[in-house]
Amino acid sequence: MKKVLMCFLMLIIGLTFFITPKNASAQSDYTPVINDTEEFLEEFLQDCYDRTSFSEAEKDAAQWIAQKFDSFGLNTEIQEFDAEYNGKKMSSQNVIGALDFERHKQVIICAHYDNIYGSNDIEGFGAEGAYNNATGVAVLLSLAKHFGELKQQDENFALDFNIIFLALGAEEVGLHGSYYYVSQMLPKQISNTLLAIDLDCVGGGDYLYLYCDELETVHERFIKQIADNNSLPLRLPPVNKKTLPASTPVTPYIHYGLNSANLYFMSVGVNSAHFFSRNWHTNNKIGMVESENNPTIIYTKDDNLKTLRRLYGDTFIQKMNAVADIIFYALTDSEFTQSMEKSAAQRPNYNWLINGSLMAYIKLGLIVIMGIIVFFLIRNFTARYPVPVITIKPTPPPTVFGDEYDKKDTDQKDNNQPPQNPFEGY
Amino acid sequence: MELTKKIQNLIDKIPVIAGIVMLAVSITFASLYSSQETTMLIFMMTWGQSGMASETLGWWFYIMGGLIYFGLFELLMRVIIYFVRWQLPMLDRNTSYHYIRVIFSVNYLILGLFHLAYFFFPLLQVWGALFDFLVSSLFLYLAYHLISRKALPNFLWARALRAVAMVFFIYHGINVFLGLFTALGGVL
């Protein structure tokens, strides 16, 4: 019996060496619908490794993206703008590619294409920006190509909304591209925007995240459901999000979900979905945590394709393909438009909650009320307990010689009485 | 007055060291969320800037800020008592310190329980500041009430209230006006 048990135990232990658990981030059984993100990433980094904000190189990168949009059959436009940076007036541009189905509603998919490589006045770190944000641009281009091909090849293919593919410039130096684009949107365009999808650092990092809003929304649940139905790993922000005490147009603090182009879309009330890859769940590191185990590469010379492959293998490509597929499935879902409209109708309005001036007025009012109460309290105490009047006996006459010396004993008898307590009765 | 005496007897029974520990623990508890925020900000402004590797810090960044706030509280308390004693030199310093520590440890316990909500709903911080102001004002009055009944003859209560109120209204008044000035873009 003992031998049987020992053999059984050995068998179990032996099996554990051969049965390895599946890596949750490796989707080896999944075949992506959109799988050319890697090619776009390589091509983009090869042709446009320097895309420093406000530089001529950034302009060249914008032209490169515009040519790609043209080749996909999109209506392409370059939107130039000026912005102030370090006290100087600088110029940049957004690239807009519209896939027009002649609808009133639209969906915006954006990714910033600039980096801080450092070939201009702006100091940089020689960062090619493979992770930040060539990965986002690669997904943008893949989606543009895929939807463009569908429209060109299939006459019956149509969506309920137009798609705007938007490559944003000058984002690394203060989100200027998204700020300008949103500021130029007409109120009708804002109300007709079903969803604004932002792709920022979607390869690399430990986990792929989706951030939509501070409170749970219908469109967040919808997109998460799409990912779950297709077994694509997508995390929502942790409940106890770590924040920094720096305010944004929509919140009195900032965190990973709010440090990108989605911020300005949120500020005008547009449903937004921000995809990014980092590690937001770790409690062992603080700061900008990309990975629990790998070093940080963002804004460093290591932010290049070679390092991405070395640190993350092919998982960063899988993340990019996963994001592209999630967006593709979401936009082609029959319930997409209805869900987005429902989400917009139910969008929580918490402007009153973060209205700092309202709070200041209330606090001022409370201070005035407290002042009135304290005034009456002081008056009441002063009336009820007046300061006692202290009577001081005259001092005895100085010791002298002669006639007054005879009265010495009489004087001393009077002085033997104990002095009255001036505070008695108070 | 009966209730006042009961509370005073209770506070008198608490050893001074226990009062210091109570205050340190309760301030740290009330500061869990802001300590995390502040430590992250200071860290990122020093070693953890973008582009540099983040360090492993661990759980203690939830309490670091609280301990610093405790130090600041002690300093502020001594400064305020110093100014109050200009008008009331007979006020006993050590009694005042002990009473303030015990009373405000209860204050920070209440605030800490409320601040736990920030971990799940950070937006509440803006209105949470108003809650902090109201509760702390109440406990400040309570501290004045208990200390003045303990350490001062009653005809000096009004003067003590005036001295404490001056510090309170000057600080919060300037605070609010600056806040309004900033919020309204410089035009009041």
Image (tube, rainbow, N blue to C red):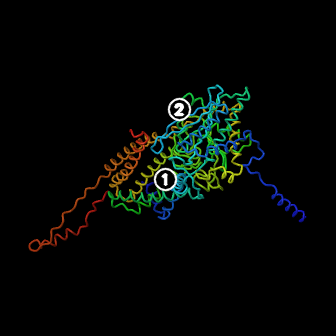
Residue B76, percent from left and from top? 42, 57
Residue A145, percent from left and from top? 69, 35
User: Which labelled disc corresponds to residue A184?
Assistant: 2
Categorize mark 1 by other alpha carbons within 10 Å: few (<14), some (14-19), many (20+).
many
**Residue located beneath label 1 in the image:** B107
Q: Are marks 1 and 2 on the same chain?
A: no
Q: Nearer the viewer, residue A183 or A340?
A: A183
Horizontal side of residue A335 vs B14, given as left or right:
right
Q: Amino acid at mark 1?
A: Asn
* Image quarter in which the N terminus of chain A is found: bottom right
As helix, strand or loop, the secondary structure at mark 2 comes to loop
State which chain disc 2 sits on.
Answer: A
Q: Amino acid at mark 2?
A: Gln
State which chain disc 1 sits on.
Answer: B
Which residue of the protein is positioned furthest toward the bottom in this rendering? A401
Query: What residue appears at the point 34 percent right and 49 percent down from the top-left corner?
Result: A378
User: Which labelled disc corresponds to residue A50?
Assistant: none
Measure how far apart labels 1 and 2 are at the Cα level: 49 Å
